[in-house]
Amino acid sequence: MSEQTNIWPLWEVFVRSSRGLSHVHAGSLHAPDAAMALRNARDLYTRRNEGVSIWVVPSDAISSSDPDSKGAYFESPQGKDYRHATYYTKSEGVKHL
Amino acid sequence: MAAASLQSVPQPQPGRDTEVLSEADAAGQAYFDRIIAEDSRIEPRDWMPVAYRKTLVRQVSQHAHSEIIGMQPEANWITRAPSLKRKAILMAKVQDEAGHGLYLYSAAETLGTSRDTMTQQLLEGKAKYSSIFNYPARTWADMGAIGWLVDGAAIANQVPLCRASFGPYGRAMVRICKEESFHQRQGFEILLELSHGTPAQRQMAQDAVDRFYAPALMMFGPPDEDSPNSKQSMAWNIKRFSNDELRQRFVGMIAEQVKVLGLTLPDPDLRYDEETGTWIHMDLNWDEFKAVIAGNGPCNAQRMARRREAHENGAWVREAAKAYAEKQAAKHVTIGAA
Ligand SMILES: [Fe+2]
Ligand SMILES: [Fe+2]
């Protein structure tokens, strides 16, 4: 099957739903190049005014944290409640603070 | 901690489920079990049991194939739609179904099976798709019955799937369900207009409902006692309700809606059972269901031939786009080097 080796690369699609908001991951698609990826993304992910701007990124260009080390990698904020405003209770009742 | 590519999907080790688990697999299984017990979501790069992955690839790709094949009965009517408005609506609906197929193929791909492999399985007749699309769409009223009953049954099935434990599947379903409600309403409106039209139009509407009622009910799959895999799917939080539960719930909804249409459902046994709080419907012909799934429905051969033809006719487009992309990339390299 010659097409098995002919597959178009995979792209991740990010859509900005309206001005002032960040681009958010919408899904992925296959396309031969960036221009076609953008066109396909428009047709696939914004058929109902879901976006005002689209980013496409080759999937293999994205690096991600390792899912197996989720505990160790993300545990640093634990025990550091003092990073949250709710940690400071003595000022309760003081206005505009 | 190693940074990992988004696409490096951990591949299952054969026999992992039956043999003694390695330490890493045992930890993975424990983590998986905890996520499921918390009713949280499994993401593509998480450890998952081989059977869970296999079940999902099969279910999600079958679902994708159904959306793609499902374009055909309605696409056949685009050129014969009775007005420009109806033509535009039907085109938008068929385009949506293509989109649904693509969302689902993307979701299935995150499990490590390539889009080409899935397409190949469909073209070679090795993959299944929903039996309903092997029934013919004979009249314009069928566009109404398909929207109301077929998309309606699909919605009843899909809304609980928005909470499926596999993240990408659930997210695809959320997007799909938002779009499906227009599909069902436009179908209902077609039937409503016909049922309030001339006697011949009204008869055409009733005939379409008569033909699609039983096949639509069979879309929920075999009765619970003949659906051995359902239990495991429910334990994995992929499926939330049994086939029969979803079916009777759907029957209850359309039993009310049909009154607004001024039509009837072709079901002499249909009634609400106060005692059990469920809707009772007639016995369905499961031999017919099995025959259609096995490839012997009225339109199986035609649907598959059309799908293969479309794939072959599109080959030059895929090749040309790829050649163009390569040429452009080469140009950029030359410019960059100069
Ligand atoms: Fe759909
Ligand atoms: Fe639909």
Image (tube, coloured by chain):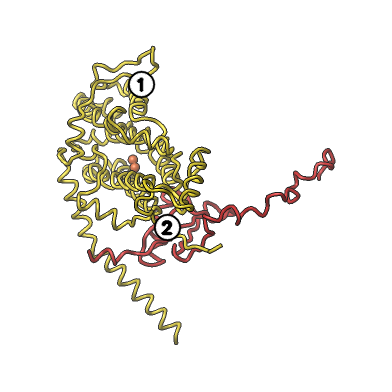
- Contact, mark 2 vs mark 1 (Cβ under 8 Å): no
Q: Are marks 2 and 1 on the same chain?
A: yes
- Identify the residue at horizontal 38%, vertical 39% (top origin): B180
* The C terminus of chain B - image quarter: bottom left
Q: Which chain is red?
A: A
Horizontal arrangement in the rendering, residue B328 relative to residue B219 (left or right): right
Name which residue type carries label 1: Glu
Q: Is residue B297 above or below residue B54?
A: above
Mark closer to the observer (2, 1):
2
Q: Is residue B223 above or below residue A54?
A: above
Which one is in front, B176 or A39? Answer: B176
Q: Earlier in the sequence, mark 2 or mark 1?
A: 2
Q: Secondary structure at mark 1?
A: helix
Horizontal arrangement in the rendering, residue A31 relative to residue A97 (left or right): left
- Identify the residue at horizontal 48%, vertical 53% (top origin): B24
> What is the drawing colour of chain B?
yellow
Which one is in front, B286 or B149? Answer: B286
Residue occupied by mark 1: B256
- Identify the residue at horizontal 23%, vertical 40% (top origin): B133
- State the image quarter where residue B66 is shown: top left
In the rendered image, residue B61, in percent from the top left (x then y), is placed at: 32, 48
Residue occupied by mark 2: B9
